[in-house]
Structure formats: structure tokens, C-alpha cells
Amino acid sequence: MTEDEKKEFEEFLKWKAEKAQQAEETKQTSEPEKVVESTPQQVNVTPENTKSSSDVEKGSSNKGLYIMGAAVAVIILLFIIVGLSGNKKSAQPAEEEEEYVVVDDDSVAVVVADADYTNEPAKAVWDFYIEKDQMTDSKNIWARITSDNYITQEFPYEGQTRATITVRYMKKYGYDVLIQISKGQMNGREYYSTNYVTARFDEGSPKKYYFNESSDGDSKVVFLRKTGDFIKNCKSAKDIKIDLPLYQGGRPLFTFHVDEPLVWREE
């Protein structure tokens, strides 16, 4: 409802109230004349009866005012409802427009056109870790790859078990090749000549590499003996397959793939 409409409506209510008051005053001033002109029987009406009749008429007048006020309140309520409905409808296009902007085909097309498709997936390579030896100031270097596949074992080693190949250089030990599993035990007895792994590089022939157990008794790690030969093959191969002797697990095969063969780094 606009300000002009509200003002006009208030003037209308004021005019209605004045008309009702004038009607009430007219009834009250005309009542004695009716009593004078009435028949003798009507003149002899007791004051109590006259007062009651006036009260009834006044009550009827008040009842009419109440009804009129209720009607006015209903009209005001209708104006308010219509006004709110109009505001809601006027706001609706803005919401729809905002949603349209979000899913605008042209905007999506621009995003797609500006997307950068030059990024290629990260290459599978040997991971290097280099640190300075605090005692000798020489560099300790580790190069490592983890198997692409995993195996599952029985209790107490259930879950995924993966293998890792690590080529390590330390000045006081030289080069080492470590084969490690994430859980379980590698079991190879030198007395029975079972302390070996079988490795195949790319499409070459399988080779046996005997190993020594870890000096600290960790059965998850072994050290290969023909270190130089193994590293030489790693420098030319992209695919390596190794079977490992596991305690109560047979000789499962682990596969390793790199996009680039081992390139030794010292920095």
C-alpha cells in the first residue's frame, strides 16, 4: 500500500467515524420528540422503561460500530496481505535471475574454454631422499619405489601388504639394495638355500639374488648380495618383478613400474 493510498484510507475511516457519531447524536436528540407526540399510554411509560429503551438503542448503535470496525480491520488485513504478496512476486524474478546466472551455459562455456589441459599426470619415478651425514659431512642418499600391487595375508598380518625396493648409498657402507615389506615376515634359510628373491627386469630372464638378513633382526627387511648387478638393471628397466619368500605366505609376486629408469642423483 502506498503512502497516498494509506492516507486516503485513513481519511475514509475518519469520515465514517464522524458519520456514525452524527447519526448517534441525531438519534439521541430526536428521542424526546417521539415521546411528546406519542399517545397517553406511551406518555405514562415509567422512567425505568424509558431508560432501558435508550440503553438498548445505544447498545445497538455500539454493536453497529463494532461490526463496522471489524469490517475495517478485515479490509486493512486484506491490503497488508495483498501488499506482501506483491512484494514477494516482485522479488521472485531476482532469485530466478540469480539462479540463471549460476547455470548460464555461456558462463560454463567460458570456464571450459579457459581450462588448462596442458597438465599431464605425474610420472612414476624413483623417489630420492638426500641428507648430510653430520659425522663425515658426506651425503646419504636413498632412492625408493613401492610396488604397484599388494597382497593380503592371514592373521596377524591381515590387510594390504606392499613391497619396497630401496637403493641406498652411505660413505661408510657403500651401496646397498634393501627389499622391504610393509607387514609380515620374510623367511629364507641359507642352510636350505631359500634365502633369495627372484627378479625380472622388463622382458629379460629371471635372476636369483641371494640376501642377508637385517643385522637388527627385522624380518621385514633383507639386503641383496649382488648389489652392483641389481642397480645396473634398475638403471635400464621400467618394469621390475620380484617374488619374495614370506613366512606361511609362499612366494608372492610384486610388480614395480616407473616411467623412467633409475637415474642416480647426488643433489
Image (spheres, rainbow, N blue to C red):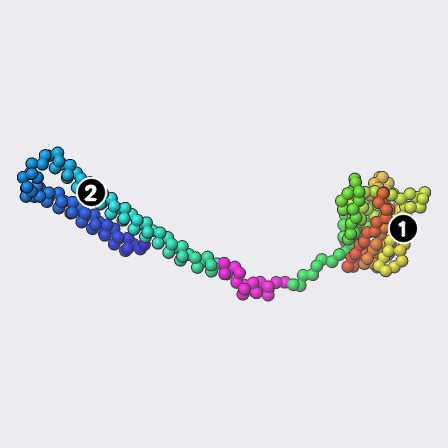
Which residue occupies the foreground of this view, 240 or 51?
A: 51
x then y, percent, for residue 3: 29, 54
Q: Which residue is mark 1?
A: 209
Tell me the tag on residue 60. 2
Above-or-below relation of 98 to 174 = below
Please report the residue visible at 8 percent of the width from the left and 39 percent of the height from the top.
Answer: 42
The quarter holding residue 58 reads top left
Which residue does the image show at 88% across and 59% down from the upper left? 204
- Looking at the rendered structure, the kind of residue marked 2 is Ser
Predominant SS along the magenta part:
helix
The region drawn magenta spans 99-116
Mark positioned earlier in the residue sequence (1 or 2)? 2
**Marks 1, 2: nearer the viewer:** 2
Residue drawn 5% across and 39% down?
40
Give coordinates of residue 182: x percent, y percent: 78, 45
Viewer-closest of 190 and 170? 190
Q: Residue furthest front?
A: 41
Q: Residues within 10 Å of mark 1 (few under 14, many from 20)?
A: some
103 magenta-colored? yes
